[in-house]
Image (spheres, rainbow, N blue to C red):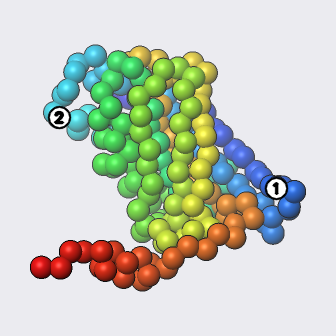
Amino acid sequence: MMQIRQIYLFDQEIRSEAGRTPASPTRRVAAAAVFKNPLAGKGAVDDLTELSDLSLEIGGILTARALTALGPLKPRGFGKVALVGTGGDLEHGPCVIHVRLGLAMRRGIQGGPALIPGNAKIGAPGTSIDIIFGGLHDEWDLDAMDTMPIGIPDAPRHDEILLAVAFLAGTRPNARTRGASREAVAKLVADMKPTA
């Protein structure tokens, strides 16, 4: 049963970075829920279905909140995080962000085929966690690779999980770093393989 204690909305608009005004403002929006972890204090439980089901339900709520905050802006990047309270198991984090949460996010944006970056860790109330953004349509969209730290002063409590989804509109502020292409990386990796 879903027991959400709090929902937070983090909305950041960057209008200047390193003394330069970006061509278009960068918007990073994250919606986070703090909810009761039904598996806290139970040790290493193998059946995590209850948590993955909760993440889909909560993810729908959070995705709607975040996209409403973006308004008419179209997201270019996305990310997700879980901060598990100290009474939980680290595996509870990956369970709530990797199994079904992406489905709720993709339903909300009606697409987004690229891999959604995720981050999970255990922490006490007030611990911060970095949301890692990746491209919505292309995981090689370097200008959409960004981060956004979030934290809630009184969460997560020992028997809670802080779960967040986030969307990036625009690009990283003043993005101008160019990396190797997908093809170049594939060739490098192929060249590193040992020969028989």
Q: Residue at x 34, y 42 (%)?
A: 94
Residue 165 drawn at (x, y percent)? 51, 46
User: Which image quadrant: the C terminus?
Assistant: bottom left
Q: Is residue 118 above or below residue 51?
A: below
17 horizontally vs 79: left or right:
right
Name the kind of residue labelled 1 in the image. Ala
**Helix, strand or loop for disc 2:** loop
Taking the spot 22% from the left edge, 21% from the top edge, the residue there is 43
Which residue extends farthest front?
A: 195
Q: Check the image and report above or below for 151 versus 11.
A: above
Q: Secondary structure at mark 1?
A: loop
> Mark 2 or mark 1, which has the lower sequence index?
1
Determine which of the numbered discs, if any, sits on residue 47 in the image: 2
* Residue 59 visible (yes or no): no
Q: Residues within 10 Å of mark 1 (few under 14, many from 20)?
A: few
Residue 167 in the image, given as x and y percentages of width and height: 58, 54
Measured as percent of width and height from the top left, residue 61 is found at 50, 42
Q: Please state which amino acid type lies under the numbered disc 2.
A: Asp
Horizontally, is 136 left or right of 55 in the view?
A: right
Q: Disc 1 marks which residue?
A: 18
Instruction: Please tell me whether residue 49 is drawn above or below residue 68 in the rendered image.
Output: above
**Are the residues tagged 2 and 1 within 8 Å (C-beta)?**
no
Which residue is at a point 51% across and 40% down the rendered structure image?
164
Residue 125 placement (x, y as % from top left): 53, 20
